[in-house]
Image (spheres, helix red, strand yellow):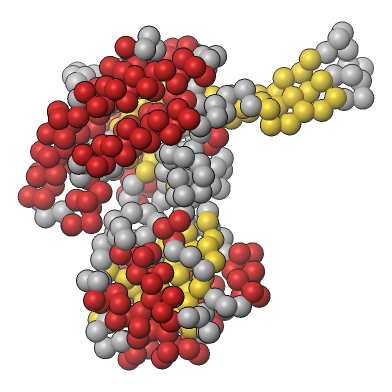
Amino acid sequence: MVMFHDLEAEIAAICRRARAAARTLAPMPTAKKNAALEAVVRSLHVRRAAILAANAEDVAAAAAKGTSGALLDRLTLNDARMDALEAGVREVVALPDPVGQLIAEQTRPNGLRVRRVRTPIGVIAMIYEARPNVTVEASALALKAGNAIVLRGSTEAARANAALADAVGEGLAQAGLPRDAVQSLETLDRDAVRILVQQSETVDLAIPRGGEGLIRFVTENARVPVVQHYKGVCHMFVDTGADPALAARIVENAKMSRPGVCNALECLLVDAADATRLLPPIGERLVAAGCELRGDERACAIVPAARPATAGDWGCEFLDRILAVRVVDGLEGALAHVAAYGSGHTEAILTPSADHAERWRREVDAACVIVNASTRFHDGGELGLGAEIGIATSRLHWRGPMGLEALTTNKWIIDGEGQTRG
Protein backbone atom coordinates (compact mmCIF):
# COMPACT_ATOMS: atom_id res chain seq x y z
CA MET A 1 0.00 0.00 0.00
CA VAL A 2 1.24 3.47 -0.89
CA MET A 3 1.39 5.89 2.05
CA PHE A 4 0.32 9.34 0.90
CA HIS A 5 2.15 12.19 2.62
CA ASP A 6 1.69 14.64 -0.22
CA LEU A 7 -1.23 13.28 -2.23
CA GLU A 8 -0.68 15.35 -5.35
CA ALA A 9 3.02 14.57 -5.51
CA GLU A 10 2.48 10.88 -4.92
CA ILE A 11 -0.21 10.55 -7.58
CA ALA A 12 1.84 12.55 -10.07
CA ALA A 13 4.76 10.19 -9.44
CA ILE A 14 2.55 7.13 -9.94
CA CYS A 15 1.33 8.50 -13.25
CA ARG A 16 4.86 9.30 -14.42
CA ARG A 17 5.85 5.70 -13.71
CA ALA A 18 2.77 4.54 -15.62
CA ARG A 19 3.83 6.71 -18.58
CA ALA A 20 7.28 5.13 -18.59
CA ALA A 21 5.71 1.66 -18.43
CA ALA A 22 3.38 2.52 -21.32
CA ARG A 23 6.36 3.36 -23.52
CA THR A 24 7.74 -0.11 -22.82
CA LEU A 25 4.42 -1.83 -23.48
CA ALA A 26 3.48 -0.04 -26.71
CA PRO A 27 5.91 -1.86 -29.05
CA MET A 28 5.85 -5.14 -27.11
CA PRO A 29 5.16 -8.27 -29.21
CA THR A 30 1.90 -10.10 -28.70
CA ALA A 31 3.58 -13.26 -27.44
CA LYS A 32 5.25 -11.44 -24.56
CA LYS A 33 2.01 -9.69 -23.54
CA ASN A 34 0.17 -13.02 -23.65
CA ALA A 35 2.86 -14.70 -21.55
CA ALA A 36 2.48 -11.94 -18.95
CA LEU A 37 -1.28 -12.44 -18.84
CA GLU A 38 -0.81 -16.19 -18.34
CA ALA A 39 1.49 -15.33 -15.43
CA VAL A 40 -1.26 -13.10 -14.04
CA VAL A 41 -3.67 -16.06 -14.13
CA ARG A 42 -1.20 -18.21 -12.20
CA SER A 43 -0.66 -15.45 -9.64
CA LEU A 44 -4.42 -15.02 -9.14
CA HIS A 45 -4.77 -18.75 -8.61
CA VAL A 46 -1.92 -18.99 -6.10
CA ARG A 47 -3.24 -16.01 -4.13
CA ARG A 48 -6.91 -16.98 -4.30
CA ALA A 49 -7.33 -17.75 -0.60
CA ALA A 50 -5.91 -14.36 0.41
CA ILE A 51 -8.05 -12.56 -2.18
CA LEU A 52 -11.25 -14.25 -1.01
CA ALA A 53 -10.41 -13.53 2.63
CA ALA A 54 -9.92 -9.85 1.81
CA ASN A 55 -13.19 -9.80 -0.12
CA ALA A 56 -15.04 -11.46 2.77
CA GLU A 57 -13.96 -8.56 5.01
CA ASP A 58 -15.23 -6.07 2.44
CA VAL A 59 -18.59 -7.83 2.13
CA ALA A 60 -19.02 -8.11 5.91
CA ALA A 61 -18.30 -4.40 6.35
CA ALA A 62 -20.74 -3.47 3.55
CA ALA A 63 -23.46 -5.73 4.97
CA ALA A 64 -23.03 -4.12 8.40
CA LYS A 65 -23.78 -0.75 6.76
CA GLY A 66 -27.07 -2.05 5.35
CA THR A 67 -25.94 -2.40 1.73
CA SER A 68 -28.67 -3.90 -0.50
CA GLY A 69 -28.56 -7.54 -1.49
CA ALA A 70 -28.08 -6.73 -5.17
CA LEU A 71 -25.07 -4.51 -4.45
CA LEU A 72 -23.61 -7.09 -2.08
CA ASP A 73 -23.90 -9.61 -4.90
CA ARG A 74 -21.94 -7.29 -7.18
CA LEU A 75 -19.27 -6.88 -4.49
CA THR A 76 -18.90 -10.58 -3.68
CA LEU A 77 -16.17 -12.86 -4.97
CA ASN A 78 -16.24 -16.64 -4.55
CA ASP A 79 -14.53 -19.62 -6.12
CA ALA A 80 -16.86 -19.65 -9.11
CA ARG A 81 -16.29 -15.95 -9.76
CA MET A 82 -12.54 -16.31 -9.33
CA ASP A 83 -12.66 -19.17 -11.84
CA ALA A 84 -14.53 -16.82 -14.17
CA LEU A 85 -11.95 -14.06 -13.64
CA GLU A 86 -9.11 -16.39 -14.49
CA ALA A 87 -11.01 -17.68 -17.53
CA GLY A 88 -11.67 -14.09 -18.57
CA VAL A 89 -7.96 -13.28 -18.60
CA ARG A 90 -7.32 -16.38 -20.71
CA GLU A 91 -10.04 -15.17 -23.10
CA VAL A 92 -8.10 -11.93 -23.48
CA VAL A 93 -4.97 -13.96 -24.25
CA ALA A 94 -6.88 -15.76 -27.01
CA LEU A 95 -8.21 -12.54 -28.58
CA PRO A 96 -6.41 -10.98 -31.56
CA ASP A 97 -3.99 -8.23 -30.60
CA PRO A 98 -5.42 -4.95 -31.97
CA VAL A 99 -2.10 -3.10 -31.84
CA GLY A 100 -0.73 -2.65 -35.35
CA GLN A 101 -3.93 -3.81 -37.05
CA LEU A 102 -4.53 -2.13 -40.39
CA ILE A 103 -7.66 0.04 -40.39
CA ALA A 104 -7.38 1.45 -43.91
CA GLU A 105 -4.81 2.01 -46.63
CA GLN A 106 -4.52 3.70 -49.99
CA THR A 107 -1.92 4.75 -52.50
CA ARG A 108 -2.20 8.41 -53.41
CA PRO A 109 -1.84 9.69 -57.01
CA ASN A 110 1.65 10.94 -56.16
CA GLY A 111 2.72 7.44 -55.14
CA LEU A 112 2.59 7.91 -51.37
CA ARG A 113 1.41 4.80 -49.52
CA VAL A 114 -0.93 5.91 -46.71
CA ARG A 115 -2.00 3.58 -43.92
CA ARG A 116 -3.96 3.96 -40.71
CA VAL A 117 -3.18 1.44 -37.97
CA ARG A 118 -4.29 0.81 -34.39
CA THR A 119 -1.97 1.95 -31.63
CA PRO A 120 -2.22 2.01 -27.80
CA ILE A 121 -3.87 4.98 -26.12
CA GLY A 122 -1.12 5.24 -23.48
CA VAL A 123 -2.08 5.62 -19.82
CA ILE A 124 -5.64 4.93 -18.70
CA ALA A 125 -7.11 6.04 -15.37
CA MET A 126 -9.87 3.62 -14.32
CA ILE A 127 -12.18 4.82 -11.53
CA TYR A 128 -14.86 2.36 -10.41
CA GLU A 129 -17.24 1.45 -7.61
CA ALA A 130 -17.91 -1.82 -5.74
CA ARG A 131 -16.78 -4.08 -8.58
CA PRO A 132 -13.58 -5.92 -7.57
CA ASN A 133 -13.66 -7.93 -10.80
CA VAL A 134 -12.91 -4.71 -12.71
CA THR A 135 -9.44 -4.62 -11.11
CA VAL A 136 -8.47 -7.71 -13.09
CA GLU A 137 -10.57 -7.28 -16.21
CA ALA A 138 -9.50 -3.68 -16.83
CA SER A 139 -5.85 -4.54 -16.20
CA ALA A 140 -5.88 -7.49 -18.62
CA LEU A 141 -7.56 -5.53 -21.40
CA ALA A 142 -5.32 -2.49 -20.95
CA LEU A 143 -2.18 -4.62 -21.03
CA LYS A 144 -3.18 -6.62 -24.12
CA ALA A 145 -3.88 -3.33 -25.93
CA GLY A 146 -0.44 -2.02 -24.92
CA ASN A 147 -1.59 0.46 -22.28
CA ALA A 148 -0.56 1.13 -18.69
CA ILE A 149 -3.41 1.60 -16.21
CA VAL A 150 -3.88 3.38 -12.89
CA LEU A 151 -6.75 1.92 -10.89
CA ARG A 152 -8.84 3.67 -8.27
CA GLY A 153 -11.58 1.49 -6.78
CA SER A 154 -14.09 2.35 -4.09
CA THR A 155 -13.99 2.04 -0.32
CA GLU A 156 -16.44 -0.89 -0.34
CA ALA A 157 -13.99 -3.12 -2.25
CA ALA A 158 -10.72 -1.65 -0.97
CA ARG A 159 -9.28 -4.84 0.54
CA ALA A 160 -10.12 -7.07 -2.40
CA ASN A 161 -8.96 -4.48 -4.94
CA ALA A 162 -5.58 -4.23 -3.21
CA ALA A 163 -5.17 -8.01 -3.10
CA LEU A 164 -6.16 -8.39 -6.75
CA ALA A 165 -3.87 -5.58 -7.91
CA ASP A 166 -0.97 -7.13 -5.99
CA ALA A 167 -1.63 -10.46 -7.69
CA VAL A 168 -1.67 -8.83 -11.13
CA GLY A 169 1.53 -6.92 -10.38
CA GLU A 170 3.28 -10.06 -9.22
CA GLY A 171 2.31 -11.83 -12.42
CA LEU A 172 3.75 -8.99 -14.50
CA ALA A 173 6.99 -9.01 -12.53
CA GLN A 174 7.37 -12.77 -12.98
CA ALA A 175 6.98 -12.32 -16.74
CA GLY A 176 9.52 -9.52 -16.93
CA LEU A 177 7.03 -6.70 -17.61
CA PRO A 178 7.16 -3.42 -15.70
CA ARG A 179 5.10 -3.73 -12.55
CA ASP A 180 4.25 -0.04 -12.92
CA ALA A 181 2.06 -0.97 -15.89
CA VAL A 182 -0.71 -1.73 -13.36
CA GLN A 183 -0.87 0.47 -10.28
CA SER A 184 -3.65 0.91 -7.74
CA LEU A 185 -4.35 4.01 -5.67
CA GLU A 186 -5.17 2.60 -2.28
CA THR A 187 -5.84 5.86 -0.51
CA LEU A 188 -9.54 6.28 0.31
CA ASP A 189 -9.32 10.06 0.09
CA ARG A 190 -11.85 11.09 -2.57
CA ASP A 191 -9.59 13.96 -3.54
CA ALA A 192 -7.33 11.32 -5.09
CA VAL A 193 -9.88 10.92 -7.90
CA ARG A 194 -9.80 14.64 -8.68
CA ILE A 195 -6.00 14.69 -8.68
CA LEU A 196 -5.78 11.58 -10.87
CA VAL A 197 -8.08 12.88 -13.61
CA GLN A 198 -6.17 16.16 -13.75
CA GLN A 199 -2.82 14.56 -14.69
CA SER A 200 -3.03 15.87 -18.24
CA GLU A 201 0.70 15.43 -18.94
CA THR A 202 0.73 11.70 -18.15
CA VAL A 203 -2.86 10.33 -18.28
CA ASP A 204 -4.46 10.00 -21.72
CA LEU A 205 -7.97 8.78 -20.87
CA ALA A 206 -10.18 8.53 -17.79
CA ILE A 207 -12.89 5.88 -17.55
CA PRO A 208 -15.31 6.29 -14.63
CA ARG A 209 -17.60 3.32 -14.02
CA GLY A 210 -20.20 3.64 -11.31
CA GLY A 211 -23.09 5.74 -10.06
CA GLU A 212 -24.26 9.16 -11.14
CA GLY A 213 -22.30 10.96 -8.43
CA LEU A 214 -19.01 9.43 -9.51
CA ILE A 215 -19.59 10.07 -13.20
CA ARG A 216 -20.49 13.72 -12.61
CA PHE A 217 -17.55 14.27 -10.27
CA VAL A 218 -15.06 12.88 -12.79
CA THR A 219 -16.60 14.67 -15.76
CA GLU A 220 -16.69 18.03 -13.98
CA ASN A 221 -13.15 17.79 -12.61
CA ALA A 222 -11.21 16.04 -15.38
CA ARG A 223 -8.54 17.73 -17.47
CA VAL A 224 -8.15 14.60 -19.60
CA PRO A 225 -10.66 13.02 -22.01
CA VAL A 226 -13.41 11.02 -20.29
CA VAL A 227 -15.40 8.04 -21.56
CA GLN A 228 -18.48 7.83 -19.34
CA HIS A 229 -19.82 4.51 -18.13
CA TYR A 230 -23.03 6.08 -16.91
CA LYS A 231 -25.98 4.45 -15.20
CA GLY A 232 -28.09 1.90 -17.02
CA VAL A 233 -31.70 3.09 -16.98
CA CYS A 234 -32.77 0.33 -19.36
CA HIS A 235 -36.31 0.23 -20.77
CA MET A 236 -38.35 -2.43 -22.51
CA PHE A 237 -41.48 -1.64 -24.50
CA VAL A 238 -44.00 -4.46 -24.92
CA ASP A 239 -45.94 -3.66 -28.06
CA THR A 240 -49.50 -4.55 -29.07
CA GLY A 241 -49.73 -8.13 -30.31
CA ALA A 242 -46.71 -9.44 -28.41
CA ASP A 243 -46.88 -13.01 -27.09
CA PRO A 244 -47.68 -12.59 -23.37
CA ALA A 245 -45.91 -15.77 -22.23
CA LEU A 246 -42.79 -14.91 -24.22
CA ALA A 247 -42.90 -11.32 -22.95
CA ALA A 248 -43.20 -12.48 -19.33
CA ARG A 249 -40.18 -14.77 -19.73
CA ILE A 250 -38.01 -12.11 -21.38
CA VAL A 251 -39.00 -9.37 -18.93
CA GLU A 252 -38.26 -11.62 -15.96
CA ASN A 253 -34.83 -12.45 -17.35
CA ALA A 254 -34.05 -8.80 -18.07
CA LYS A 255 -35.00 -7.71 -14.55
CA MET A 256 -34.33 -10.63 -12.25
CA SER A 257 -31.37 -12.62 -13.60
CA ARG A 258 -28.98 -10.08 -12.03
CA PRO A 259 -30.82 -6.99 -10.74
CA GLY A 260 -27.64 -5.18 -9.66
CA VAL A 261 -25.94 -4.89 -13.05
CA CYS A 262 -26.08 -2.02 -15.53
CA ASN A 263 -27.90 -3.96 -18.28
CA ALA A 264 -30.74 -5.05 -15.99
CA LEU A 265 -34.19 -3.76 -16.88
CA GLU A 266 -35.32 -0.78 -14.78
CA CYS A 267 -38.56 0.33 -16.49
CA LEU A 268 -41.24 -1.63 -18.33
CA LEU A 269 -43.46 0.15 -20.85
CA VAL A 270 -46.63 -1.54 -22.13
CA ASP A 271 -48.91 -0.39 -24.95
CA ALA A 272 -52.26 0.79 -23.58
CA ALA A 273 -54.08 -0.81 -26.52
CA ASP A 274 -53.11 -4.30 -25.30
CA ALA A 275 -52.12 -3.77 -21.68
CA THR A 276 -55.06 -5.65 -20.13
CA ARG A 277 -53.92 -8.81 -21.96
CA LEU A 278 -50.15 -8.36 -21.68
CA LEU A 279 -49.52 -6.86 -18.28
CA PRO A 280 -51.22 -9.36 -15.89
CA PRO A 281 -49.07 -12.41 -16.81
CA ILE A 282 -45.91 -10.28 -16.80
CA GLY A 283 -46.80 -8.79 -13.42
CA GLU A 284 -47.69 -12.15 -11.91
CA ARG A 285 -44.40 -13.69 -12.98
CA LEU A 286 -42.35 -10.79 -11.65
CA VAL A 287 -44.16 -10.67 -8.29
CA ALA A 288 -43.78 -14.44 -7.90
CA ALA A 289 -40.04 -14.00 -8.49
CA GLY A 290 -39.84 -11.42 -5.68
CA CYS A 291 -39.89 -8.21 -7.70
CA GLU A 292 -41.53 -5.04 -6.37
CA LEU A 293 -43.55 -3.26 -9.04
CA ARG A 294 -44.04 0.52 -9.02
CA GLY A 295 -46.67 1.47 -11.54
CA ASP A 296 -48.43 4.51 -12.91
CA GLU A 297 -52.18 4.82 -12.43
CA ARG A 298 -53.10 2.69 -15.43
CA ALA A 299 -50.59 -0.04 -14.54
CA CYS A 300 -51.80 -0.22 -10.94
CA ALA A 301 -55.39 -0.61 -12.14
CA ILE A 302 -54.36 -3.68 -14.16
CA VAL A 303 -51.90 -5.18 -11.64
CA PRO A 304 -53.22 -4.59 -8.10
CA ALA A 305 -49.98 -5.93 -6.59
CA ALA A 306 -48.13 -2.88 -7.93
CA ARG A 307 -47.62 0.08 -5.63
CA PRO A 308 -48.04 3.63 -6.99
CA ALA A 309 -44.91 5.01 -8.59
CA THR A 310 -43.48 8.39 -7.67
CA ALA A 311 -41.96 10.94 -10.04
CA GLY A 312 -38.50 9.79 -8.93
CA ASP A 313 -39.12 6.23 -10.13
CA TRP A 314 -38.99 7.28 -13.79
CA GLY A 315 -35.37 7.44 -14.89
CA CYS A 316 -34.19 5.67 -11.73
CA GLU A 317 -31.50 2.98 -11.77
CA PHE A 318 -32.75 0.81 -8.91
CA LEU A 319 -30.05 -1.88 -9.11
CA ASP A 320 -32.43 -3.98 -7.04
CA ARG A 321 -35.53 -6.17 -7.31
CA ILE A 322 -37.67 -3.15 -8.16
CA LEU A 323 -39.22 -2.33 -11.54
CA ALA A 324 -41.03 0.80 -12.67
CA VAL A 325 -44.03 0.04 -14.90
CA ARG A 326 -45.87 2.51 -17.14
CA VAL A 327 -48.73 2.05 -19.59
CA VAL A 328 -48.03 4.24 -22.63
CA ASP A 329 -49.99 5.23 -25.70
CA GLY A 330 -48.41 3.14 -28.41
CA LEU A 331 -44.96 3.32 -29.94
CA GLU A 332 -44.98 7.11 -29.88
CA GLY A 333 -45.58 7.12 -26.14
CA ALA A 334 -42.77 4.62 -25.59
CA LEU A 335 -40.32 6.59 -27.73
CA ALA A 336 -41.20 9.79 -25.88
CA HIS A 337 -40.69 8.15 -22.48
CA VAL A 338 -37.31 6.69 -23.46
CA ALA A 339 -36.19 10.05 -24.86
CA ALA A 340 -37.13 11.74 -21.58
CA TYR A 341 -35.79 9.20 -19.08
CA GLY A 342 -33.26 6.94 -20.81
CA SER A 343 -29.57 7.10 -19.94
CA GLY A 344 -28.34 6.07 -23.39
CA HIS A 345 -27.44 2.55 -22.27
CA THR A 346 -29.84 -0.19 -23.49
CA GLU A 347 -33.37 0.11 -24.88
CA ALA A 348 -35.44 -2.92 -25.97
CA ILE A 349 -38.73 -3.55 -27.76
CA LEU A 350 -40.83 -6.72 -27.88
CA THR A 351 -42.99 -6.50 -30.97
CA PRO A 352 -44.43 -8.61 -33.81
CA SER A 353 -44.36 -5.53 -36.06
CA ALA A 354 -41.41 -5.23 -38.46
CA ASP A 355 -42.24 -1.55 -38.97
CA HIS A 356 -42.21 -0.81 -35.24
CA ALA A 357 -38.98 -2.76 -34.82
CA GLU A 358 -37.31 -0.74 -37.55
CA ARG A 359 -38.49 2.55 -36.09
CA TRP A 360 -37.09 1.48 -32.71
CA ARG A 361 -33.71 0.69 -34.27
CA ARG A 362 -33.65 3.97 -36.15
CA GLU A 363 -35.11 6.44 -33.65
CA VAL A 364 -33.93 5.33 -30.21
CA ASP A 365 -30.70 7.06 -29.14
CA ALA A 366 -28.73 4.56 -27.04
CA ALA A 367 -25.48 2.62 -27.06
CA CYS A 368 -27.51 -0.52 -27.77
CA VAL A 369 -31.04 -1.10 -29.09
CA ILE A 370 -32.53 -4.58 -28.87
CA VAL A 371 -35.48 -6.14 -30.66
CA ASN A 372 -37.28 -9.15 -29.18
CA ALA A 373 -34.62 -10.16 -26.65
CA SER A 374 -33.48 -9.41 -23.10
CA THR A 375 -31.53 -6.27 -22.23
CA ARG A 376 -28.98 -8.54 -20.56
CA PHE A 377 -27.41 -9.28 -23.96
CA HIS A 378 -25.78 -5.85 -24.02
CA ASP A 379 -22.48 -7.25 -22.77
CA GLY A 380 -19.05 -7.57 -24.33
CA GLY A 381 -18.88 -11.33 -23.95
CA GLU A 382 -22.36 -11.84 -25.38
CA LEU A 383 -21.53 -9.60 -28.35
CA GLY A 384 -18.33 -11.42 -29.23
CA LEU A 385 -15.80 -8.98 -27.78
CA GLY A 386 -14.57 -11.28 -25.03
CA ALA A 387 -13.90 -9.40 -21.80
CA GLU A 388 -14.95 -5.77 -21.49
CA ILE A 389 -13.80 -2.86 -19.41
CA GLY A 390 -17.42 -1.70 -19.13
CA ILE A 391 -20.22 -0.26 -21.24
CA ALA A 392 -19.68 3.32 -22.36
CA THR A 393 -22.65 5.65 -22.72
CA SER A 394 -20.55 8.50 -24.13
CA ARG A 395 -20.60 9.37 -27.80
CA LEU A 396 -16.82 9.99 -28.08
CA HIS A 397 -14.55 8.16 -28.58
CA TRP A 398 -16.54 4.99 -27.93
CA ARG A 399 -20.07 3.82 -27.21
CA GLY A 400 -21.17 0.45 -25.88
CA PRO A 401 -18.99 -2.41 -24.58
CA MET A 402 -15.32 -1.43 -24.41
CA GLY A 403 -13.12 -4.33 -25.40
CA LEU A 404 -9.59 -4.37 -26.80
CA GLU A 405 -10.35 -2.30 -29.89
CA ALA A 406 -11.88 0.46 -27.76
CA LEU A 407 -8.60 0.78 -25.82
CA THR A 408 -6.68 1.77 -28.92
CA THR A 409 -6.44 4.89 -31.04
CA ASN A 410 -5.02 5.21 -34.54
CA LYS A 411 -1.80 6.33 -36.15
CA TRP A 412 -1.22 7.46 -39.74
CA ILE A 413 1.80 5.96 -41.49
CA ILE A 414 3.01 7.51 -44.74
CA ASP A 415 5.68 5.82 -46.87
CA GLY A 416 7.20 7.75 -49.72
CA GLU A 417 10.01 7.64 -52.26
CA GLY A 418 11.24 11.20 -52.16
CA GLN A 419 7.95 13.01 -52.83
CA THR A 420 7.68 16.69 -51.93
CA ARG A 421 4.63 18.91 -51.77
CA GLY A 422 4.26 21.90 -54.04
Residue at 64% x, 64% y is 362
Name the image quarter holding residue 168.
top left
Q: Classify 382 as above or below 134.
A: below
Pick whichever, 21 or 102, lies toward us.
102
Percent position (x, y) of residue 373?
48, 65
Percent position (x, y) of residue 395?
55, 48
Q: Residue furthest left?
A: 64
Q: Does residue 390 appear left or right of residue 56 in this picture?
A: right
Q: Where does the N terminus fall, quadrant-wise? A: top left
Q: Classify 421 as above or below 394.
A: above
Residue at 50% x, 41% y is 385
Q: Classify 81 as above or below 270.
A: above
Q: Does residue 69 appear left or right of residue 282 in this picture?
A: left
Name the image quarter holding residue 177.
top left
Residue 31 in view here: yes
Pick whichever, 288 or 16, lies toward us.
288
Residue 232 in view here: no
Q: How many marks?
A: 0
Percent position (x, y) of residue 208?
38, 41
Residue at 52% x, 68% y is 372
Q: Classify 322 as above or below 273.
A: above
